[in-house]
Image: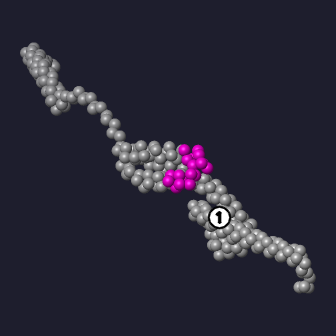
Amino acid sequence: MHGSYTSPINDILQNITGSADELGRSTVMKKAIPWAVLAAALFLAVSCASTPPQKPKEPEPPQVTVEPQKPVVPAPEAELAKAKELKQRADRYSLGEYAPVEYAAAVKDLGAGEAAYGKDNAASKQSLDRAIEGFTSVISKGGGLLVDKIQQQSAASKKAADDIKAPVAVKDEYAKALEVYSRAIKEKAAGDLEQAGSDFAQAQDMFDAVYAQARDKREKALQAMKEAEQLQAESEQKAQEAETSLTDEGFSTEGGR
């Protein structure tokens, strides 16, 4: 029974030893907890120190709208000169009378182009382009009507010269007038209205001159005939008077006795 016996002293020692172990473990745990807390605090402090505080977001500056610069438009010098030149041509022949609406619009556009010239060259060019188009239409429309009118007048002068026999009385001058007249007809057919109108007007003047020359020749011929007839009548009267005088004096006028 010696083997199963336990001395009371051993039990006391074991209890003391056990209590000491538990006390040691408790002390260690109590010491470990503050160190863990301290380590966590240090970790948080380091984390906060390494992450800089975020600054408040600054307000964005107001957006400024920058308009694109307009391209520099040169002064429409050529367009202005062209519009004025076309207006002068229209005025030279009074073509505005044949296309009054188009002419008035073109004059208005020319005025607007001149007013904007050097101030707003883009707007000036647009107005002058419309003026050029308008005056061109006036010249085309009015020019055609004017040429028709001049041609009719020239044809009337030609007929008058023909009726008075000018091709015979003044042959050379009539041939020159007819040449200009024929050329004008060809120019009109080719669309050269300005030159056609000029040549029709020239032909009219030439036919009028031919008519006047032929008329003068005719009048002189008629006067000569009248004078000849008058001389003949006077001669016949003198012969009759002489015969009467001889008869009265007893002379016979028959057979020269």
Pick the residue in front: 183 or 171: 171
Q: Quadrant of the N terminus?
A: top left
User: Tag 1: residue type?
Assistant: Asp
Left or right side of 214 for 27: left
The residue at the point 78 percent across, 70 percent down is: 230
**Where does residue 93 sit, x and y in percent of width and height?**
56, 54
For the record, the magenta segment spans 87-104
The residue at the point 68 percent across, 75 percent down is: 171
Residue 167 can be seen in this image: no
User: Extreme front residue here?
Assistant: 249
Q: Quadrant of residue 7?
A: top left
Crowding at mark 1 (Cα within 10 Å: few <14, some 14-19, many 20+): many
Pick the residue in front: 163 or 74: 163
The residue at the point 91 percent across, 81 percent down is: 252
Dot 1: what SS? helix
Question: In this figure, which residue is indicated by the disc labeled 1?
Answer: 208
